[in-house]
Image: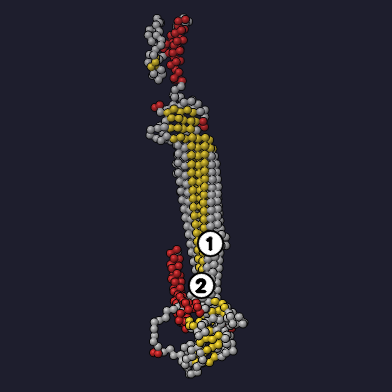
Amino acid sequence: MIKNLVGTQVPAVVDVQSERYNTAHLNFGGGGTLEALLKPIFKGKHLGFTLAEMMVVMLILSIVLAAMAPVVTTRSKVDQSSPWRYSEGNLSDAYYGLGESQTAMIGQREFTNTDETAKLIINTSGTRPSHIAFLLGKLSASGSLGSNAVAIGNEVNAGQKAVVIGDEAEAIDSGVVAIGSPAKSSGDGSVVIGVGGTTGKYSISVGTLAVSMGENAVAIGTPSMSYGNSVAFGAGSQANSYGTALGASTEVSSYGTAIGYDASANKSKAISIGNSSYTNGESAVAIGQNTYARSDDSIAINAGTSDRGATGLQSISIGNLSKTGDDYALAIGAGAQAKSESGVALGYNATAEDESTIAIGTSAKATSFKAETHTNYPGIAIGLGAESSGGIAIGNNGKFLTINTGNTYATTNGIAIGNNAKASGAGNVAIGVNACSGVTGNNKTCIGSNSGPKSTSHKSDTTLESLYFGSGGSFNRDSVSINETNAIFELHKKGDYAMAILNADLIVQGYVWQHFAGKSGHGDAIGRGHSKTWGNELAMYNDSVPAWPYSDMSSDRRLKYVGRESTSGLDKIRLLKVFNYTFKKDETKEPRVGVMAQDLQKIFPDAVKKGEDGFLRIRMEDMFYAVINAIKELDTRVTALEKVNAELKIRLEKLEAKIK
C-alpha cells in the first residue's frame, strides 16, 4: 500500500524486483521516501540506466505525482492569494479573491466576531444563529461590520443585524436599518430611509432630511421631524413628544394632534384638524379649514377665516364665521358672535355684544345697560331679530332698549314677548304682536296685539306708570270727556274707544265716568256723591248700546254672595283674535282694531249679551279680570324664566370650572 502525505493509504501499484535493491514494495508514508529510493542513482553508482530502469523511474514518478494531486488543493496553505484558506478541525471552507476588498466566505466559523473586511460571509452553526455580513464598498475609519449585517456604500458603519445602504450611512445598533447617502440610524430597532435622515431608538424616519429623535418616534416626509413617541407624516411636518402631525407643513406640540395641510397645534394637548387650522392654547381644539382657537381650553369649529374662531379662555365658537372674543363666551351658528366675557350667541348672525349678554335666534342682538353706578345689566334677546339692551326680549323682532333722559337714568328689567314687540324704555313690558311699538317712555306695560298709547307725547312719557290692554287708544288721562287722550289703564273694545278708563282716582275707589262715544259728547260722574242717573241708551255712530247706571261702586265683601274664584287668564286671552275693521255706517271709514263679539262669546260667554236690536253687546268685566289673571301668570312665568336663567348661569359656571 502507498500512503499520501497526510496518511491516507492507497493501493500499491508497483512491485520492484531488483538485484540492486532488497525491497519488495514502496512505502511513501511509512518511512520510505523517494530520496532513499533514488539515492544510489544520485551518488553515481550507475553511470546509465537500462530501459527497464527508465521505465521503473517513470512509473515511480507517475505514482508520486498521482499521490501529490490532493496535496496541491489542500487547505494547508494560508496565503491570501490562495483560493482556499485553512480551517482547524475541518470546520469551514473559505474562498478569497485576490485582495482584501474582494473577500467572500461560505461555511462555519468557530468565533463570534467578524473582523475581516469582507464582501460576503455566510455562517451556519449549531451554537450560533446563521448570519450574513455583506459589504460592498468600505467601512468608515471607526466603522465595523456586525454579524447578520448588510452594508453597501463607502464610509459605512453597520452594527449587528443592521442594514446599511448609502455612502456614509450608519446603523450602529442592533437590528437597525439606514438607507440613504448619508443616513444615520441610532438605537435598537430603528429605521431611517432618505438622504440625510436621522432616527433614534425604535424610531422611523422616511424622507430626505427626515428626523425622528428619541424613542418610538415616526417621521415620514421630506423633510419632517418628530420627537419621542410622536408621529410626523407629511412634507415639512413636525411633531413634539407624544404628538401626532398628519399633513404637509403640519406642526404639533406635546400630546397634541394636527391633521391637514399647514395645520398647527402650538400648545400641549391641543387639537387642530383641517387645512390651515390653528390652535394657540393648551387643550384647545380647532376643527375646519382656516379655523382658529387661540386660548387655553377654547374650541372652534368651522370658523373659516383667521379673524374669527375662538378667542378667550374656555370659549366655544361653532359655525362658519362664528367668533368668541373673550373668556367663557359661546357662539354657535354661522356668523354668530359672542364678543365679551361669558356672552352667549346662538343662531345665524346672532350677536352678544357685552359681558354676560345672551342672544338666541337669527340676527338676535343683546347688549348690556350700564347704570350711573357703573353696574352692568346684561340683556337677553330670544327670537328672530330680537334686540335687548339690559333687559329681556322674547319673540321675532322683539326689542328692549334702555335709554337715558336728562338726569334720569333708566333702569333695566324690561321684557318684550311677541313679534315686533318693543320694550324700548326702562322697565317696560311688551307682550303681543307690535306691543308698545314706538313707545320710548319708561315704565309702560302693553299687553295684546298693537297695544299701547297712540299719542306721540304719551309714547315718550317717562313720568307715569301706564298699563295698556288691546290696541292703542286716544283718551286724555287728564280729562275723560275729551278725545285724543291716553289712560294709565285702558280696556279696549272695537275701535279706538275704550269700554273703561281707569285712572289713578277712578279705579274702584275713584269716580266712574259714563262717557259719550260721539266726538262732541261729554262725560259726567256716576257713583260716590252722585245720584244722577242716565237713560239706558248711549249714542255711538247712530247705533245704540245699553247702559246700566248705578249710584255707587261699593266692592265691600259683606254686600256680596262670593262664589268660586275666577281662573280665566292667559289661556283665554291667548285665544282672542284681534281684527282691523271699520264700521259700515262710518262715512269716514276710520280704521279700528278690536275683537268680534261672536269670537269673544266662545271664550267668555258671560261677557256677551244680545241687545234689543238683536246685535251682540260686550261686557268688558270678564275680559278685564281675565287680563289681571293673565298678568299674574306672565309675572309667574317671567319669575320662572329669571330663576331658570340664574340656574343656567350657575350650571355654566360649574361646567366651566370642570373644564378648567
Q: Quadrant of residue 515?
A: bottom right
In the rendered structure, the answer to whether residue 587 lies left or right of residue 427 reads right
Q: Which mark is residue 43?
A: none
Q: Which residue is mark 2?
A: 394
Which residue lies under the disc numbered 1? 319
Residue 65 at what x, y percent from top left?
45, 15
Q: Between disc 2 and disc 1, whose residue precedes?
A: 1
The mark tally for this picture is 2
Between 281 and 617, which is closer to the camera in this rendering?
Answer: 617
Name, please, the residue furthest toward the right. 588
The residue shown at (45%, 63%) is: 659
Most foreground residue, 116 or 320: 320
Residue 128 shows in this picture: yes
Name the residue rendered at 51%, 56% in the picture: 272
Identify residue type, mark 2.
Ile
Q: CA distance from mark 2 to mark 1?
A: 23 Å
